[in-house]
Amino acid sequence: MDQNESRTMTRRGLLRLTAVSALCLSLPTMTGCMTVPKYKPIGAGEGKSMELIHCNIVDVIQGVVHHDRTIAIRNGLIESISDRIPSPREGSLVIDMKNQYLIPGLIDAHCHSTLSSEAEFNPFGVPTMLGQVKRNYVQQLSQGVTTIRDMGALPKLLHKNLELIEKGELAGPRVVFCNAFTNVYGGHPDLDPADVSAFSGIAMAFTGNPSLWFKSIPELKEKMQGSLENGASFLKLTMDNKSLLCGKGEIPVYSEEELQVIFEFARRNNLPVAGHIHTKFGFDRALKYGINSMEHSLGDASLTDREIAEMAEKKIAIVPTMGIAQMLAAPEAFDKIPEEYRNDFIDRELSIRRQFLDSTPDHYIEPAIHKKNVEALQYYREYGCGNLYKNGKFMAKPDFYFHVLLYGPKNLLKMKEAGIVIGCGTDAGIPYVYHGTLWREMEMLGRIGFSNQEVLRCATINNAKILRREDKIGTIDKGKLADMVVLSANPLVRIETCRDPKMVIKGGQIYEVSPLALKIHESDHHG
């Protein structure tokens, strides 16, 4: 077989594979072309109550524990909190929490639920990728995350998964979403799907495009309106002028007129605006327009006291996602890590990163994906960062993320002192950052200098404020949704206990962690 014939056969094989993949994506009850096992949580019947007795309730605002309380739940809401023990006739269902600790349901305020965390697209691994996308939701819920904010999705695939969660056919958190990125054509994420696969157009006919990529103001207005009508509750902008991908440089940005149109649309429709911001260029524009939340941390500037004060005055929140800097600051790109990137904090983070990469995190990612991710790190040395994109390798710039580790902690601590609302999110779905690992971001905030109480607030009530849902979630209080995580020890004393939830309660329905874990292993086995 000559080279041309081999190439033709490869293209035919890819076309057939893409057709099969598209079929999988078009069937909402399928994961990698296999049936998703249903999981039925425990809960009281409609109109009946459930009483959780002997609860140690963690008050994340006051930083105290209310011992031996009873929580009454009805129709998914917390009906009352008291110190009485109900008689068997008063409650439809009574469950003894045995003095374990209950915290509010955790919130991942920045993730991408329809992305599979792969560093390299494998056209022959599409069934595994599809299985992982379904697993994302299970992994989040099993780790105590009862609400996520999806910051840019494959919209059609997202809505199919939301239908499965709503029907009880897929265990997962509630999802607050923006549908796709509201981005200028070629702006971040500046990865043209056609560069990844010649058949991406076929796939996106079933999954939807994660980028609006508008080319004119009329098109921008039309696409924002369409996203709003498709259930979006906020807008996600991409404010940087530089690519984060090795081998790419400057990227297109919004004009001032386009930003005026976007923010006017947001005000008119009462939509908060969140912005991907890794650069001072993006920060300055976001500060000028009074964005609602900044996403990520700067990798090219230390902020002045005046800038942070203005941020606080305009009530701009931040979800720093520092964990992505830990994972994407790749020492594999260097013969020796430059001295400018060496300090005690960075050395410790790189050690933690290495431990995670060397582990077998099967509870968070399909083993085949993790294996390929680790192998892909060799591309930095094999090609050199500047040559990766033109060789079809889409890797992040390690130098930039080392700078995030240098600038980010100082900026963040100054924001904390200024009273800025700081949330907690993972950016899970991007390469090397896996769903269900909010605890890693929480612990990293602790190493930066946040107290355990502050960490818990970031992951609960602060996130709820950023999502504009603090009246429904974020604390364990009467009238709020019954979202809770059961822990064996007091997280105000030991935040690491959040790694291992004993039980997860979402909307008054109890999800035991072990069956959720079993569900993942069943998915692995059949995949």
Image (cartoon, helix red, strand yellow):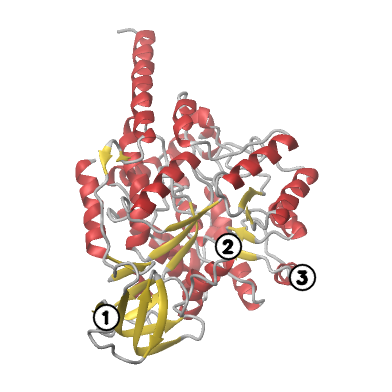
Nearer the viewer's eye, disc 2 or disc 1?
1
Residue under pointer 3: 306
Other-residue count near label 2 (Cα within 10 Å), few / some / many at <14 / 14–19 / ≥20: many
Q: Quadrant of the N terminus?
A: top left
Q: Name the outermost residue toward the bottom.
A: 84
Which quarter of the figure has residue 361?
A: bottom left
Q: Is residue 501 visible?
A: no
Q: Earlier in the sequence, mark 3 or mark 1?
A: 1
Q: Position of residue 429 (x, y in %)?
A: 44, 49
Q: Is residue 485 visible?
A: yes
Which quarter of the figure has residue 249?
A: top right
Q: Is residue 455 above or below residue 68?
A: above
Q: Position of residue 31 (x, y in %)?
A: 31, 41
For the residue labelled by badge 3, is the local secondary structure a helix, a strand or a loop? helix
Q: Is residue 355 above or below residue 14?
A: below
Residue at position x 55%, y 36% from top? 191
Q: Position of residue 439 (x, y in %)?
A: 40, 66
Residue under pointer 1: 97
- Marks 3 and 2 sit apart, C-alpha to C-alpha, by 20 Å
Who is closer to the viewer here, 525 or 471?
Answer: 471
For the residue labelled by badge 1, is the local secondary structure a helix, a strand or a loop? loop
Who is closer to the viewer here, 195 or 42?
Answer: 42
Residue under pointer 2: 406
